[in-house]
Image (cartoon, rainbow, N blue to C red):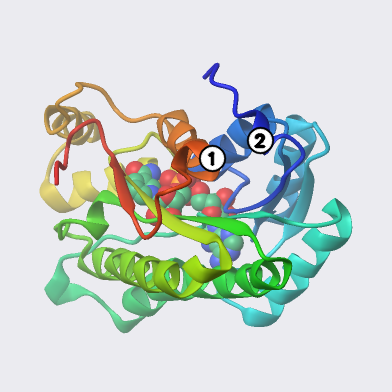
Amino acid sequence: MSVCYAELSGRRALVTGGARGIGRAIAAALAAQDVRVAVADIDGAAAAGAAAELGRGSVAVQMDVTDRASVEAGFGEVLAQLGGCEICIANAGVSTMRPALELTDRDWDFNFAVNARGVFLTNQIAARHFVAQGAGCIVNTASLAAKVGAPLLAHYSASKFAVLGWTQALARELAPHRIRVNAVCPGFVRTSMQAREVEWEASLRGMTPEEVIADYIRQTPLGRLEEPEDVADLVVFLCSDGARFMTGQGINVTGGVYMG
Ligand SMILES: NC(=O)c1ccc[n+]([C@@H]2O[C@H](COP(=O)([O-])OP(=O)(O)OC[C@H]3O[C@@H](n4cnc5c(N)ncnc54)[C@H](O)[C@@H]3O)[C@@H](O)[C@H]2O)c1
């Protein structure tokens, strides 16, 4: 998108799950605003590839957001490689799909480890640095499933509701430090996560993958699948001074699937 937020130029951002999908689009949209981006991902090789493709001083960091030591070491690397950090995008997330009564402890723990604990650790470690420097901005990737319970994704929904609760509480605690904390809630976004979910849902609901996608589009008033860039543009706005009076929000960007 061609909007220019001059105030973002020269800032430095950590983007988790930045190697592909929504995180990669966020990294690209920030880089287009002249933000230096650290692409952090559990898949270090993919993060390196994404950072090389982005250019503009982007760097890659291998980081497992479920693991405190890994996030601490990774954030230290971000500071060393970029010389500082003012923006934290906690975007890494996973999903599995199963009827609620067939969910396993493993499904629950895996989704909560990445989606909830991952956001907690990433935000906490970045925010300690932001508090010390007296400024910073945090955006977390929640989901449509953080606003309404999603069938076959009860555990995922619960982990994403947790992200919004954490985002609101952190926003209240950090506001006196001039740190804003917001979340974005995307809908049916065309990424590798969606490709996996379409296959699972097709087999669980006895549909073809094409029928599942058609159903997603039918639920979307704006009439198409969401693109990662649709989310990225909102994230950049939330990092900009245009959002200077917004904190503790979970902003829907779903093409109208959810209105509320
Ligand atoms: N695709 C959608 O329809 C959709 C909708 C709403 C919300 N979301 C959320 O958006 C975010 C990005 O999803 P996506 O669709 O781009 O997924 P994706 O699977 O395409 O990409 C996710 C990235 O996160 C990385 N990752 C996974 N576990 C990690 C970990 N422990 N530590 C660090 N990195 C890790 C993966 O390697 C991958 O590069 C997630 O939080 C997801 O829940 C996605």
Amino acid type at mark 2: Glu
Front residue of this view, candidates 166 and 212: 166
Q: Position of residue 52 (x, y in %)?
A: 79, 36
Amino acid type at mark 1: Asp
What residue appears at the point 66 percent right and 35 percent down from the top-left corner?
A: 7
Q: Position of residue 117 (x, y in %)?
A: 47, 76
Residue found farthest to the top? 2
Q: Which residue is mark 1?
A: 241
- Residue 255 vertical position relative to residue 155 in the rendered view, above or below: above
* SS at circle 1: helix
What residue appears at the point 29 percent right and 28 percent down from the top-left corner?
A: 225
Label 2 – label 1 distance at C-alpha: 7 Å
What residue appears at the point 61 percent right and 78 percent down from the top-left corner?
A: 67
Q: Position of residue 243 (x, y in %)?
A: 45, 42
First along the sequence among labels 2 and 1: 2
Report crowding for label 1: few under 14, some 14 to 19, many 20 or more residues within 10 A (C-alpha). some
Front residue of this view, candidates 151 and 7: 7
Q: Position of residue 65 (x, y in %)?
A: 58, 69
Front residue of this view, candidates 192 and 73: 73
- Residue 250 vertical position relative to residue 230 in the rendered view, above or below: below
Residue 62 shows up from this direction = yes
Res. 124 image quadrant: bottom right
Q: Which residue is mark 2?
A: 7
Q: Is residue 249 left or right of residue 174?
A: left
Q: Is residue 98 left or right of residue 53?
A: left
* SS at circle 2: helix
Whether the residues at callouts 2 and 1 have beta carbons within 8 Å, the answer is yes
Q: Is residue 212 left or right of residue 2?
A: left
